[in-house]
């Protein structure tokens, strides 16, 4: 994996999307090799999502006309309601960058890494299942053209509008999981599935981001969590129904709890789930503490599949179901985990009873 940095930027005052984006983009040092910018702000409905995305794309093109970063737009409300951006830059000065309209290929000494921008379906009005199949067809085209295999994917983000909503006996998240399983069936996964997050969004249908890695000499291994049943081994009892597929079969979520690439731990979206059962506590602080206990166990040195003396969180993205809970979560996280870069977003979680989900990265000290 090629070394990358991440920074957070926020608009300071409300305004149009264009004005807030311009404020953020003007504050990014121009000497940085910017690979990708992930924007966050709430949207209402497909037309608002698409118009906001188009405005952000125009702002990026105007600010960086010759080396335009990849764009990903996530329709999630930020803690202050203003536009927020994660800016990913390349820290490895010896790597080469090959830019395409919807993906980037990074290369150095036999290591190749692919990053996509946010991939959206052609029709946001279709079912979640149909949108997901469309997106995975687009991903397959990108992978094939770039000479990556499906099982080279090591990190994936899956944003699903109305993630737990059911219609005609079919849940949106389950529809996505079934489409993902169909796509993944075209590959062999002896080295484990990608780390992944499946999280809700306020609009935009389905959107997927991913990273893929092809390297003969970079550590790239899955990390399990002894406190949790692997998501791809869940029993049918914890899966929702899906009437979109011909056989009405329910597929498990195909991801690992984390992946280790080089010295970086990519932590999948983690919630207060022990074994495969959700926390019985309907209390935001209890679920926050339980989630971090599970993550701490996941990244403890004894659980890392390579020599490791210690681990340290670098970045945490914290999804909170109810905006009113954010100040409580912020206070808890700042008291117990002050060091990592972090930000807070309003989002439905993949199970209705869950109030919070946390993802991020950590690094190991050999």
Image: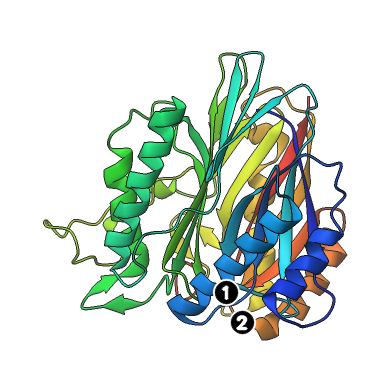
Q: Residues within 10 Å of mark 1 (few under 14, many from 20)?
A: many
Mark 1 and 2 residues: CB-CB less than 8 Å, in contact?
yes
Q: How far across and how far down the image is residue 13, in percent?
A: 83, 80
Tell me if residue 94 comes above or below residue 47 in the rendering. above
> Foreground: 305 or 86?
86
Name the residue at the left extreme: 247
Tell me if residue 238 comes above or below residue 180 in the rendering. below
Viewport quadrant of the C terminus = top right
Q: Is residue 175 left or right of residue 110?
A: left
Image mark for residue 199: none
Tell me if residue 283 comes above or below residue 9 in the rendering. below
Q: Is residue 173 left or right of residue 112?
A: left
Helix, strand, or loop for circle 2? loop
Image mark for residue 355: 1
Q: Which residue is mark 2?
A: 322
Helix, strand, or loop for circle 1? loop
> Foreground: 24 or 85?
24
Residue visible at 27% across and 60% down in the picture: 130
């Amino acid at each position: 994996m090629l070394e990358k940095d991440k920074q957070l930027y926020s608009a300071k005052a409300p305004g149009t999307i264009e004005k807030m984006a311009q404020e953020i983009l003007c504050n990014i040092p121009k000497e940085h090799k910017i690979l990708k910018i992930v924007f966050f702000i709430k949207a209402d409905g497909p037309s608002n999502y698409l118009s906001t995305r188009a405005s952000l794309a125009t702002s990026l093109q105007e600010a960086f006309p010759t080396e335009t970063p990849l764009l990903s737009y996530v329709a999630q409300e930020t803690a202050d309601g203003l536009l927020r951006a994660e800016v990913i830059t390349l820290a490895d000065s010896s790597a080469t960058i090959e830019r395409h309209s919807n993906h980037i290929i990074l290369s150095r000494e036999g290591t190749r890494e692919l990053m996509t921008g946010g991939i959206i379906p052609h029709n946001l009005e279709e079912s979640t299942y149909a949108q997901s199949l469309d997106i995975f067809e687009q991903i397959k085209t990108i992978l094939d053209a770039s000479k990556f295999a499906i099982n080279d994917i090591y990190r994936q983000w899956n944003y699903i509008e109305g993630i737990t909503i059911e219609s005609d006996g079919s849940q949106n998240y389950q529809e996505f999981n079934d489409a993902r399983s169909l796509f993944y069936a075209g590959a062999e996964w002896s080295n484990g599935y990608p780390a992944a997050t499946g999280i809700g969004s306020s609009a935009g249908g389905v959107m997927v981001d991913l990273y893929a890695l092809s390297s003969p000499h970079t550590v790239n291994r899955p990390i399990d969590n002894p406190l949790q049943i692997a998501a791809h081994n869940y029993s049918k009892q914890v899966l929702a129904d899906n009437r979109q597929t011909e056989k009405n079969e329910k597929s498990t979520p195909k991801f690992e709890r984390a992946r280790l690439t080089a010295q970086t731990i990519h932590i999948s979206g983690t919630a207060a789930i022990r074994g495969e059962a959700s926390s019985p506590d309907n209390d935001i602080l209890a679920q926050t503490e339980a989630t971090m206990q599970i993550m701490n166990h996941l990244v403890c040195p004894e659980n890392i599949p390579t020599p490791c003396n210690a681990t340290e969180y670098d970045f945490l993205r914290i999804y909170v179901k109810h905006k009113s809970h954010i100040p409580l979560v912020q206070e808890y996280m700042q008291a117990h985990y002050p060091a990592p870069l972090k930000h807070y977003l309003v989002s439905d979680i993949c199970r209705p009873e869950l109030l919070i989900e946390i993802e991020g990265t950590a690094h190991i000290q050999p």
